[in-house]
Amino acid sequence: MSKQLLLFALCAVPLAQAHAQAAGSRIAYVATERLMTESKLAKKADERIEAEFSKRDKSINEQIDNVRSLAEKFEREAPKMTEIDRTRRTRELIDMEKDVQRKQREYREDLMQRKNEERANIATKAYKIIEQIAAQDQLDVVIYEAGWFNPRIDITDKILKQLDK
């Protein structure tokens, strides 16, 4: 039993020291998602992306409407067509649908890539500001993701103000 007590005492001392050091530490929290949605940089990036992709989005939507109307027309005319014409038009419609789906997929991929580029740019700038504020406020730790945090340690608004300058 005395060996167990000795082992417990040896483990308890470093844990108590770590707890005491942590109690004196200064910790802050940053809601990164807010930086990506509420900052002026994020809003300007969204506007740029919208302008960049709106023409392409409109074109794809027009193609979708065109395929839809051709499919409806085909449904009305199919009973009057020969088997060869029905088969040919069916293949044409399938090819058109595949083309539109491919364009939609490429559009989504390009849009996501562009959004990720803008977010990376914002994250880089935010990280520099976080470093500055951490040094300025003598913070020991800045947490980005947390299951729960005390609003008292949230410095997101401070970061947003600096990002918006």
Image (cartoon, rainbow, N blue to C red):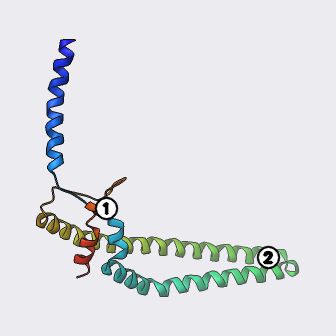
Residue shown at 18% from the left, 28% from the top: 11
- Residue 44 appears in which quarter of the rendering? bottom left
In the displayed structure, 84 sits above or below 19; it is below
Q: CA distance from mark 1 to mark 2?
A: 66 Å
Q: Amino acid at mark 2?
A: Arg
Q: Quadrant of the N terminus?
A: top left
Residue closest to the eye, 165 or 116: 165
Pointer 1: what residue? 151
Q: Alpha-carbon neighbours of circle 1 within 10 Å: few (<14), some, or many (≥20)?
A: few
The image quarter containing residue 124 is: bottom left
Relative image position of residue 42 (x, y in whole percent): 34, 77
Query: Is 144 or 150 nearer to us in this picture?
Result: 150
Identity of the residue drawn at 42% across and 87% down: 51
Query: Which residue appears farthest toward the front when viewing the image?
Result: 152
x and y, in percent, of residue 10 in the image: 14, 25
Residue shown at 18% from the left, 21% from the top: 7
Q: Nearer the viewer, mark 1 or mark 2?
A: 1
152 up-or-down from 105: above or below? above
Please name the residue that numbered disc 2 is placed on.
86
Label 1 close to label 2 by CB (< 8 Å): no
**6 vs 157: above or below:** above
Residue 102 percent coordinates (x, y): 54, 72
